[in-house]
Amino acid sequence: MAGRESSARDDRPRGAAGARRTTTAGARRTGSPRAGDRRTGTGPAADRRPARPAAGAVAPAPGDGLVVGDPPGAARAVGVLLVLAGPAGVAALLPTYLVVGGRELALAGGLGGALAGLVVPLTAVAVGAGLAAGRVPRFGLAYAGVGGALALGAMLIEVYRGSTSTVRPGIEVLAGERVLTSSVQTGGGWWLQVAALALTVVAGVLAAASWNRTVMEDRGALDPARPGLAGAAVVLGVLTVLCLALPAADVPDRIVADPSTGLEVVVEQPGPQALLERPGLALLGGLLLAGAVLLGSVLAPSLRPRLAAVGGFLAVAVTVLAAGLGGLRDAVASDELDWTVPGAGLLAAGLAYVLLTVLAWRLRRTSS
């Protein structure tokens, strides 16, 4: 009995040690697949790693997601015409514009005249160069289309000044000078100005013809802001037409004392004719110009993509701003003229159109 009890006591430690060895070995065997999972990337640690995109997946386009196709040849030709119109407009500032009643007039009668005359040509060169190179084509086409409509009315007014203004002589403000159109002779500046406007009109026609064949689209980043821009543009268009209808610089009335009664009497002096009071081609040009301003204001916010709306606004902005600066130039250059409220409103409208252009360029819908 004593021998069997001693043998049993001796076997218990060996059994416990064996059990511990068996448990440890089992733990190693159980843990070995996890180590293998870490090596092969199939375990729980691998599940916590972010999934990588499959090879060949297309990442979303940044920004507006702008898609631009290869522009047709007609669109590039529009850019070339704008580039040609720009230098012609700049060159028109230097030589004699018109000889009215024996007085030679030049469009760049000073620093103010040069600045007012450079706004449209320099913008046309910048936009046309990008369009001719094939960059953001609908931006350039929108500028050319709206600018061509505006240039048509201005071209008819120029033709009237150089050819038929002597049929009904009247007081005009030309290049900052108050003149009587009893006799008018055209100079090199007038021909260059008409050529620049004609090139812009042809560019506008080609832009309208090639619009649907030009591929350029985005994600609609400007869509939420289009109604607000359209409302502001229509209000500005109406304001601009009202300001264009009256002279931007006019001859002030004189106050004369009546020697017999001693009363002061206001005497009106003949001033420049309003835009819609002129006859013939000038009246037609004024109507077309006013209609183009309204049409451009309504059309620009609806153009797609966003950069096309920017181009439409830019065309109206530079045209109205140049007209406002021209009225200010006339008032500053001549002692006989005063800057009128419509002239100040025209300049304010031009600056407001510039603001709309910047807003159309910068406003974007935040992507979710």
Image (spheres, rainbow, N blue to C red):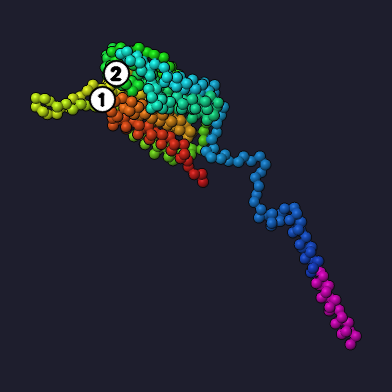
Q: Is residue 4 above or below residue 46?
A: below
In the rendered structure, find residue 166 and report the number of the disc placed on it.
none
Q: Is any atom of residue 303 visible in this view? A: no
Which residue corresponds to mark 2? 179
Q: On the image, which quarter does residue 298 sit in?
A: top left
User: Which residues are drawn in magenta?
Assistant: 1-22
Decide if residue 367 is on the left or right side of residue 350: right
Which residue corresponds to mark 1? 251
Count of numbered tags: 2
Q: Main secondary structure of the magenta part?
A: helix
11 in magenta: yes
Q: Nearer the viewer, residue 265 or 228?
A: 265
Decide if residue 58 is on the left or right side of residue 6: left
The residue sitting at the left extreme is 261
Residue 15 placement (x, y as % from top left):
84, 75
- Label 2: how many Cα within 10 Å (few below 14, some 14–19, many 20+): some
User: Which sits earlier in the primary sequence, circle 1 or circle 2?
Assistant: 2
Identify the residue at horizontal 43%, vertical 31% (top origin).
314
Q: Nearer the viewer, residue 268 or 240?
A: 268
Identify the residue at horizontal 81%, vertical 66% (top origin).
25
Q: Give the residue type at disc 1.
A: Val
- Secondary structure under tag 1 reads loop
Callout 1 touching callout 2 (CB < 8 Å) = no
Q: Is residue 223 above or below residue 242?
A: below
157 in magenta: no
Identify the residue at horizontal 10%, vertical 28% (top origin).
262
Q: Is residue 94 above or below residue 10?
A: above
Q: On the image, which quarter does residue 252 sit in?
A: top left
